[in-house]
Image (cartoon, rainbow, N blue to C red):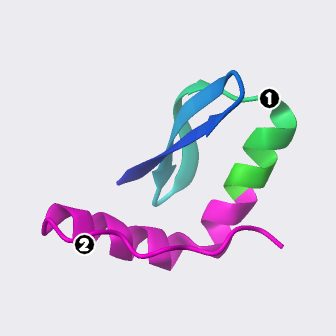
């Protein structure tokens, strides 16, 4: 399971369980934010991964505050 991060020139694929950078490049601050967000929402990300595998739309996940 993974998700994609896109921001400006940064593009990456990050694993969900465990949360880690799979490939791509992100500025350190953006990587830190993405890692924190994914850690906080890991269960929701995994649920959405399973929903997509069943051809169901993903549910929204809150951004960092």
Magenta segment: does it hold 2? no
- Residue depicted at x 69% and y 54%: 35
Q: Element at badge 2? A: helix
Residue 20 locus on image (x, y percent): 57, 46
Q: Would residue 34 be found to the left or right of residue 21 on screen?
A: right
- Judging by the rendered image, the residue that carries numbered circle 1 is 27
Residue 24 locus on image (x, y percent): 56, 24
Q: Quadrant of the N terminus?
A: bottom left
- Judging by the rendered image, the residue that carries numbered circle 2 is 51
Q: Would residue 42 be found to the left or right of residue 62 on screen?
A: left
Q: Quadrant of the C terminus?
A: bottom right
- Residue depicted at x 86% and y 40%: 29
Q: Are marks 2 and 1 in contact (CB under 8 Å)?
A: no
Q: Residues within 10 Å of mark 2 (few under 14, many from 20)?
A: some
Residue 2 locus on image (x, y percent): 41, 50
- Residue depicted at x 83% and y 34%: 28
Q: Nearer the viewer, residue 2 or 48?
A: 48
Residue 26 locus on image (x, y percent): 71, 29
Q: Which mark is residue 58?
A: none
Indicate the quadrant where residue 5 lies: top right
Q: Which residues are magenta?
A: 36-65
Residue at the outermost left position: 54
Q: CA distance from mark 2 to mark 1?
A: 30 Å
> Is residue 14 depicted above or below 57 in this figure?
above
Magenta segment: does it hold 44? yes
Q: Element at badge 1? A: loop
Q: Would residue 30 be found to the left or right of residue 1 on screen?
A: right
Q: Residues within 10 Å of mark 1 (few under 14, many from 20)?
A: few
């Amino acid at each position: 399971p993974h998700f994609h991060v896109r921001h400006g020139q940064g593009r990456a694929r990050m694993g969900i369980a465990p949360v880690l950078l799979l490939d791509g490049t992100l500025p350190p601050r953006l990587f830190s934010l993405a890692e924190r967000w994914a850690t906080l929402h890991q269960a929701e990300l995994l649920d959405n991964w399973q929903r997509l595998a069943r051809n169901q739309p993903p549910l929204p996940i809150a951004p960092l505050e």
